[in-house]
Image (cartoon, rainbow, N blue to C red):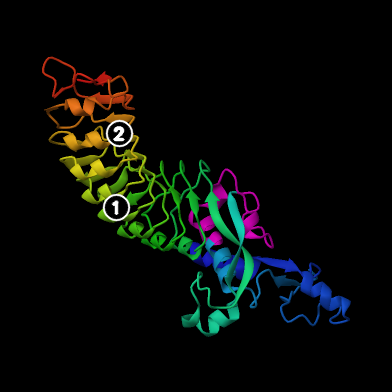
Amino acid sequence: SAQQRARDFLVLRDTLPLAVMDEDDEQQQSNGGGDNNGDDDPLAIPSTTNEPKTRPYLETTTPAYRVAQRFAAAVVYYATNGTNWETSNLWLEPGVHECDFVGVSCQELPIPAVTLEEAIQNPNAIPRHDDGTVDSTTERMIVAIDLPENNMGGFIPQELSALPYLQRLGLWSNAIGGSLPSQLGRLTRLSSLLLDDNLLEGNIPEDFGLLKEMAYLSLGLNDGIVGRIPAELGDLSKLEQLNLANMSLRGPIPTAFGQLENLVDLYLQNNRLSRGLPVELENLVNLESLVLSDNEFTGDIPSSWKKLVKLKRLEIQSNKMTFDVDERLCSLRNNAPEGGLLEALVADCQGEEPKVSCTCCTSCLP
């Protein structure tokens, strides 16, 4: 498994020659402690050949959160077929800090000072990463992983939840399959999750509603993702862009989406969404793009949507809707006397018997 291969890497391959010393080693040497050949080093990995002795890159005194971070990075590599990536510079090079792997960004952050040894001895006493009441130390911690268009395959491992400081995960335009791990909902600092244009399957986890810092959520172009849109996504109060287009979603737009007052772009086209359009979307006062085409919506556009005064793009074509576009909605057009911002209004208003009557649409389709 990817997890076992990651463990094997950390235990067997992730080593440094004893000749490579850190600052503590150098200080000990300058004080006259130890010898030059490392024969007394308890961390030395014995060799049955004449090859130089080595020591583990990570030690029992390494902070537990740092060890978990390196393990998680190794699992990501193996789970997504790292040997086939287009770019994998420095990934899993023994002794190279995971923050130096291509596509990884880090920040110097305070983390709990509990060591690997202490965590092993008392695993139930490991403090939360954001527990400010415990002793801390500063480490380079992963805040972003960006590897788009990189020929990644395999699956997204749940071990990503061991990166509690992660703010951005950008893996779009790859060939990653499998389901979306619900454990990603534990990444409370995650503000950008970009997984569109992959081969993902299954449902959108309800736990994604726990991602309170989420601003950009893009899962589109994964037609293996099915089921309903979780109402819990309506709890993402900081969300600015939501892309769930070109999937296989069913059911209605959750009325809870009316709580997304910071939403600017909502893309739901080319699914199997149905029922009427929720009146509650009238609360999306910052909405600029709303694309609902190629679904199975019925009814008409709620007249209260005239409150969407920042709307620049509205596409509702290729649905099961038969209605007259309300003149109050037309007042949003940028050529209207009221001087609205709406630049694109697309509906099924063409043909001998058009389903939609619209005098202010910018484009009419049959």
Residue at 80 percent of width and 71 percent of height: 50
To which quarter of the image does residue 86 belong? Answer: top right
**Which residue is situated farthest in the bottom direction here?**
121
- Magenta stretch holds residue 92: yes
* 315 with respect to 74 (left or right): left
Which residue in the protein does label 1 denote? 234
To which quarter of the image does residue 27 belong? Answer: bottom right
Residues 228 and 306: in front is 306
Q: Amino acid at mark 1?
A: Gly
Which residue in the protein does label 2 denote? 309
Question: Vertically, is 275 above or below 113?
Answer: above
**Which residue is situated farthest in the front direction here?**
338
Count of numbered labels shown in the rendering: 2
**10 Å crowding of disc 2: few (<14), some (14-19), many (20+):** many
* 111 with respect to 279 (left or right): right
Question: Vertically, is 281 above or below 360?
Answer: below
Residue at 32 percent of width and 33 percent of height: 311
Residue 25's label in the rendered image is none
Range covered by the magenta-colored residues: 73-102
* 88 with respect to 339 (left or right): right
To which quarter of the image does residue 198 belong? Answer: top left
Question: Vertically, is 151 above or below 73?
Answer: above
Question: Vertically, is 134 above or below 233?
Answer: below
- Magenta stretch holds residue 119: no
Q: Secondary structure at mark 1?
A: helix
Q: Position of residue 298 (x, y in %)?
A: 14, 36
Q: Amino acid at mark 2?
A: Val
Q: Position of residue 327 (x, y in %)?
A: 18, 25
| Res 78 seen here | yes
